[in-house]
Image (cartoon, helix red, strand yellow):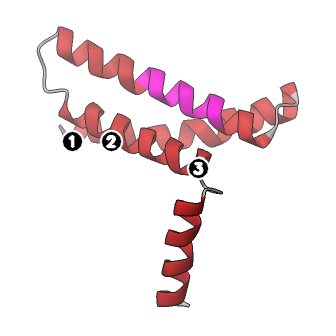
């Protein structure tokens, strides 16, 4: 389990480099680069989870990692929505 969570942690390093490469070399917008980077991480995590399911290993770690990245992707894409802005406003009132 520890190895699978460490692999999941390494996914955090894939997206920024890949996204910057898309912006610099392919002139993608920031929004597109972030989305494509997230899709790459989804594919890798999903592939590893499917591999664990096929080999009848515990797939819990990659399911958790995939769920967290999907949540991250949703919060990024809906960051300007009214719901998310009200959450941010409440957080700012409490801590700042």
Q: Position of residue 90 (x, y in %)?
A: 50, 80
**Left or right: 80 with respect to 41?**
right
User: Badges 2 and 1: C-beta atoms under 8 Å apart?
Assistant: yes
The quarter in which the C terminus is drawn is bottom right
Q: Residue at x 46, y 27 (%)?
A: 42
Q: Which residue is mark 3?
A: 78
Disc 1 versus disc 3: nearer the observer: 3
Q: What's the distance in space between the residues labelled 2 and 1, CA to CA? A: 6 Å
Would residue 55 be counted in the magenta stretch? Answer: no
Q: Residue at x 50, y 30 (%)?
A: 41
Magenta-colored segment: predominant secondary structure: helix
Residue 87 at x, y = what percent? 49, 70
Q: Is residue 22 left or right of residue 92?
A: right
Q: Which residue is mark 2?
A: 6
Which stretch appears magenta?
A: 35-44
Camera-nearest residue between 86 and 72: 86
Q: Which residue appears at 34% of the width and 39% of the height?
A: 67
| Residue at the spot 19% in from the left edge and 33% down from the top edge | 60
- The location of residue 59, given as percent across then percent down, is 19, 27
* Callout 1 crowding tier (Cα within 10 Å): few <14, some 14–19, many ≥20: few
43 in the magenta segment: yes
Give the CA distance from mark 2 to mark 3.
28 Å
For disc 2, the neighbor class at 10 Å (few under 14, some 14 to 19, many from 20) is: few
**Which residue corresponds to mark 1?**
2
Return the mark for residue 26.
Answer: none
Verify CB contact (< 8 Å) between mark 1 and mark 3: no
User: How far apart are the alpha carbons under marks 1 and 3?
Assistant: 32 Å
Compare marks 2 and 3 and give the one earlier in the sequence: 2
């Amino acid at each position: 389990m520890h190895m699978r969570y460490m692999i999941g942690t390494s996914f955090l390093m894939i997206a920024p480099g890949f996204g910057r490469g898309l912006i610099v070399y392919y002139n993608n917008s920031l929004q597109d680069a972030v989305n494509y980077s997230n899709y790459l991480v989804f594919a890798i995590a999903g592939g590893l989870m499917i591999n664990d399911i096929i080999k009848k290993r515990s797939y819990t770690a990659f399911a958790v990692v995939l769920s967290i990245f999907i949540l991250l992707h949703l919060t990024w894409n809906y960051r300007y929505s009214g719901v998310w802005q009200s959450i941010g406003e409440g957080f700012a009132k409490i801590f700042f």
